[in-house]
């Protein structure tokens, strides 16, 4: 800190070497204690604490005044640095060997009694959000916000050194298909028309490649109107990247270096790169997830060869009809409680399980406890034991159904078992992973129409383009990749389509007719006529990375002013009602009717 007219040092800078010097500090009263007429104050600024002492024998008037100081008053203190009395040093504080003997104390502002104490964790999140500026005074939040700054800075420096140019793109823009609802803004100057807030700067960044910028990045605010969870916010920040004349591995290498530098800046740890890679197919088969947590095993095992001729009819016929039978061996979990079993079945049901319960086998006291066991022939039992490495104390779950169901259900069950068994409790592992070769398209279960798995600008793998032309859409893989850490998707991207005809073809597969293509994406298709270079990119979720670096489990803890899980900011009371007249000026009339409380 540079000394200025207010202060000569910050509150974590005073050391033994300053003993005998006069210093001036500014900050908040962290705590005040009266020890037999001598008042001790811990003065706090963002850097830390310094103890200030008011001794009646040194300055009786000031000591008397200091009795009126209250927590969170803002002070400017001048005094002489002194050694603390022997035995009263505080080894936990950087300033713990010294104290300031106050000679002047200026109250810059008084504080009312705070609605909550800053030195205690508060479970009432609404309260924290309402007084977020107080919540942010806490050490933990201060650290989180500063860690976020450090990793953002590291990202900027890394990308700058790699030749990337930071460019801002419009916030008032047009809808861009990233798979969520848009936030819309009425355009007063164009009555009846709306801007959409960007779900991502996707089209702009591609257009910058057509513009010849070659390497672009942005710490970009994005907006998606969707239901919220712990790691989702209606507005969030991504590190958005695009480059020309590159292939997948160029992006992968760049992003590995970027994440290594961000984690080094945020945690001091050296992350080994390159990260392992896995295809989407393998991730789904083994973990039932495209963002697998590889810190623990309990993998999904295909049991087709064991049960193809099973005496247990459901297994046999499922396989005969083209379905799958898959299992998870929850090692050492035979002691599962009834409550946990009920919970697992609930989760499986939420994930799409059609039967009432997951079939299971418990191995306890040398016995195979399960209604299924008796249906299996001797060699089937042996083959099953061998394939799953089943032994005393294990609990095995089975699912028979479609491949997708087995992935969804066993994938969720696997994660929940790990939670219940606390398999990652004291783990400090950072298991980074690339998931590659995603499918390009997926079929909507209800409408049967094809939708883009990533977004419609993603390039099919060159060797799969004939499959696309042949209409075998389910088999077409995309030049798309996600980077995953401990079960969280940190980011994703793709190599893009840069040819007008291929882009138009994909739009038509997605059911976007020519008129709509011209209306919604005319600018992009036009741009592709004028010399578009091959290009690709990726976006990393900055909030999520900051959350993981800070060891938090919600992104709300690393965003200065987040929304709650209903999308509201309780501090400013946003969103808010807008009066009729203002709405009329922007040609808007609300159709919302508040529900009347039901009559008793
Ligand atoms: N636009 C994508 C997203 O926001 C990222 C990308 O493809 O670069 O997820």
Image: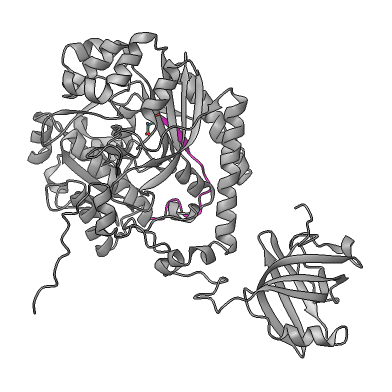
Asked if residue 13 is positioned above or below residue 544 in the image, the reply reads: below
Q: Main secondary structure of the magenta part?
A: loop
Displayed quadrant of residue 26: bottom right
Give the percent coordinates (x, y) of residue 296.
42, 44
Residue 523 visible in the shown view: yes
Along the line of sight, the residue nearer the viewer: 213 or 36? 213
Residue 474 visible in the shown view: no
Q: In terms of image quarters, where does ligand 1 lie?
A: top left
> Which range of residues does the magenta coloring cover?
421-434
Residue lying at the far right of the rendered structure: 20
Displayed quadrant of residue 387: top left
- Which residue occupies 48% across, 67% down? 131
Asked if residue 206 is positioned above or below residue 125 in the image, the reply reads: above
Asked if residue 333 is positioned above or below residue 437 in the image, the reply reads: below
- Which residue occupies 74% across, 74% down? 106
Give the percent coordinates (x, y) of residue 267.
60, 46
Give the percent coordinates (x, y) of residue 6.
76, 62
The question of residue 76 being in magenta is answered with no
Along the line of sight, the residue nearer the viewer: 316 or 458? 458
Q: Which corner quadrant holds the C terminus?
A: bottom left
In the image: residue 511, left or right of residue 413: left
Along the line of sight, the residue nearer the viewer: 425 or 440? 440
Give the percent coordinates (x, y) of residue 582.
29, 54
């Amino acid at each position: 800190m540079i000394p200025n007219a207010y202060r000569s040092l910050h509150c974590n800078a005073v050391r033994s070497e300053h003993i005998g010097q006069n210093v001036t500090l500014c900050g908040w009263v962290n705590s005040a204690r009266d020890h037999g007429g001598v008042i001790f104050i811990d003065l706090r600024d963002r850097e830390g604490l310094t103890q200030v002492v008011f001794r009646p024998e040194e300055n009786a008037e000031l000591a008397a005044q200091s009795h009126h100081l209250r927590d969170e008053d803002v002070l400017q203190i001048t005094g002489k640095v002194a050694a603390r009395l022997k035995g009263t040093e505080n080894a936990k504080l950087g300033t713990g060997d010294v104290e300031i003997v106050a000679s002047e104390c200026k109250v810059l502002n008084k504080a009312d009694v705070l609605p909550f104490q800053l030195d205690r964790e508060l479970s009432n999140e609404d309260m924290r959000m309402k007084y977020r500026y107080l919540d942010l005074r806490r050490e933990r939040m201060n650290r989180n916000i500063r860690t976020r700054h450090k990793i953002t800075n590291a990202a900027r420096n890394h990308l700058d050194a790699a030749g990337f140019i930071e460019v801002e793109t419009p916030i008032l823009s047009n809808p861009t298909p990233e798979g969520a609802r848009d936030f819309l803004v009425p355009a007063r100057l164009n009555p009846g028309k709306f801007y959409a807030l960007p779900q991502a700067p996707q089209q702009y960044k591609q257009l910058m490649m057509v513009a010849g910028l070659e390497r672009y990045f942005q710490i970009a605010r994005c907006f998606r109107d969707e239901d919220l969870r712990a790691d989702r916010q209606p507005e969030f920040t991504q590190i958005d990247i695009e480059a020309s004349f590159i292939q997948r591995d160029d992006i992968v290498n760049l992003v590995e270096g970027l994440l290594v530098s961000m984690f080094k800046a945020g945690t001091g740890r050296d992350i080994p790169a390159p990260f392992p890679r896995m295809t989407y197919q393998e991730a789904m088969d083994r973990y039932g997830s495209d963002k697998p947590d590889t810190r623990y095993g309990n993998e999904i095992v295909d049991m087709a060869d064991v049960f193809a001729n099973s005496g247990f009819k459901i297994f046999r016929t499922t396989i005969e009809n083209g379905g799958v039978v898959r299992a998870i061996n929850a090692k050492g979990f035979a002691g599962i409680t009834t409550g946990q079993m009920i919970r697992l079945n609930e989760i499986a049901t939420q994930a799409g399980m059609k039967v009432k319960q997951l079939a299971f086998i418990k191995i306890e006291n040398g016995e195979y406890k399960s209604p299924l066991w008796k249906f299996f022939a001797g060699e089937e039992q042996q083959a099953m034991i061998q394939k799953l490495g089943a032994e005393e104390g294990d609990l095995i779950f089975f699912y028979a159904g479609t491949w997708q169901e087995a992935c969804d259900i066993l994938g969720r069950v696997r994660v929940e078992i790990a939670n219940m068994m606390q398999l990652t409790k004291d783990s400090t592992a950072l298991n980074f992973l690339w998931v590659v070769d995603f499918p390009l398209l997926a079929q909507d279960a209800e409408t049967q129409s094809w939708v883009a798995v990533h977004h419609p600008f993603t390039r099919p793998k060159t060797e799969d383009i004939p499959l696309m032309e042949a209409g075998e859409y389910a088999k077409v893989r995309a030049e798309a990749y996600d980077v995953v850490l401990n079960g969280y998707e940190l980011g994703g991207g793709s190599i893009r389509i840069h040819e007008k005809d291929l882009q138009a073809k994909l739009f038509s597969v997605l059911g976007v007719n020519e008129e709509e293509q011209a209306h919604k994406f005319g600018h992009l298709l036009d741009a592709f006529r004028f010399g578009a270079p091959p290009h690709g990119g990726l976006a990393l979720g900055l909030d999520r990375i900051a959350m993981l670096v800070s060891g938090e489990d919600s992104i709300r803890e690393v965003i200065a002013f987040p929304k709650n899980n209903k999308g509201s900011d309780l501090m400013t009371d946003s969103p808010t009602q807008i009066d009729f007249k203002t709405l009329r000026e922007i040609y808007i009339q609300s159709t919302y009717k508040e529900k009347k409380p039901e009559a008793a």
